[in-house]
Image: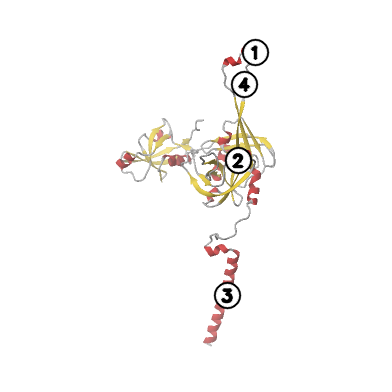
Amino acid sequence: MRKRQLMNILQYLLQWSMAGLALAFVLVYLNPALLRGGQFPADAPQPRSYNQAVMQNAPAVVNVYASQILKPSSHPLFHDPLLRRFFGMPEQGAQRNNNLGSGVIVDSSGYLLTNAHVIHQADEILVTLSDGRQATAEVVGMDSETDLAVLFIDLENLPTAPIGDSGRLQVGDVVLAIGNPYDFGQTVTQGIVSATGRKRLGITTFEDFIQTDADINPGNSGGALISASGELVGINTAIFSRTGGSQGIGFSIPINLAINVMQQIIEHGFVRRGWLGVETQIIPQDMVDALGLTQGGVLIAGVLKDGPAAKAGIMPGDILTEINNEPLYNPRQAIQMVSQFQPETRIDIVLLRGWEKIHLQAEVAQRPAPRP
């Protein structure tokens, strides 16, 4: 009797084991990545074409032609009709300086993103769509501190680029750059994300660039950086080059940042950023040694009279070490941190004055527009 019970139990376990193995085989067959802990196998077949991703975005990528009228400077005598009559001096007409770039339509109502340096000081901006339509663009606003500009075109049935999430980009992700290099017409190049969060490049005041080896050449500025799945993840902005051509190091503004700037420009006409009214610099090493600093900080080199910092009691020579419990390490990081607060926000500041630690509160103000 016991032997029969034991056989029944073994038969029951064997049946369920076989069912489990069959289920595991089906799952692995449908998703081989499970064998590698969820990682994509190195020998797995790669996509044969990115055509679908490109076609989702290409109609929304436009050519931007910005022109500036340059009036010739000449001596006032050259305008004397008598001198012109006897000496036959020709009229000097105005010249036109043309700048070439790209842009991306991100709203079907007519808003598009491009780089501020593409349209800087332009008297006329012409936008050409991939379907051949053309329109004169209106400048909604510019933010030179991120090198972004928002344009508006009055056309119907406008295509738009699907907006992605640049915060999810990882090093090694495949990306495609779409733009109008050298005015050849719309061109697509492919590469990978080489790095994210690139800062201290000296390109703009507020930097958080995506670095890519997808070829970006003159004329690509303001164009689209898209993911392999066809989502807009960046606005192509700059290249590192010793020759003027692409050397595999290009930089794009993350689309999350670009959309935030665009929305603020549309709503306010400018980007709202916090400002303390101080001039900061790196703490000299002799001061670091004398004070025994280990937590970092930034040195206040100057304080604007009647500015937010002055009203809070901050003085030249103070060392700012924390803002809202976040440690400070260098002047650029301090500017970035303060700029993220909306004007009229009160922030907690910790500083060193000599060997004394002081806690203050300051109300940040609107960051002034940079001088042209």
Q: Which mark is residue 18?
A: 3
Question: Disc 2 or 3, which lies upstream in sequence?
Answer: 3
Distance, label 4 to label 3, CA atoms, is 92 Å
Q: From the viewer's perspective, is the residue at label 4 or at label 3 nearer?
A: 4
Amino acid residing under circle 2: Pro
Q: Residue at x 62, y 35 (%)?
A: 65
Q: Residue 92 carries which label?
A: 4
Expressed as whole percent of the image width and height from the top left, the position of residue 117 reads: 55, 35
Q: Which residue is drawn at 52% across and 46% down?
A: 211
Amino acid residing under circle 4: Gln
Count of all numbered marks drawn on residues in the image = 4
Q: From the viewer's perspective, is the residue at label 2 or at label 1 nearer?
A: 1
Question: Disc 2 or 4, which lies upstream in sequence?
Answer: 4
Disc 1: which residue: 85
Q: What is the basis of the colouring in this image? A: secondary structure
Residue 173 visible, this angle: yes
Expressed as whole percent of the image width and height from the top left, the position of residue 286 reads: 31, 39
Disc 2: which residue: 181
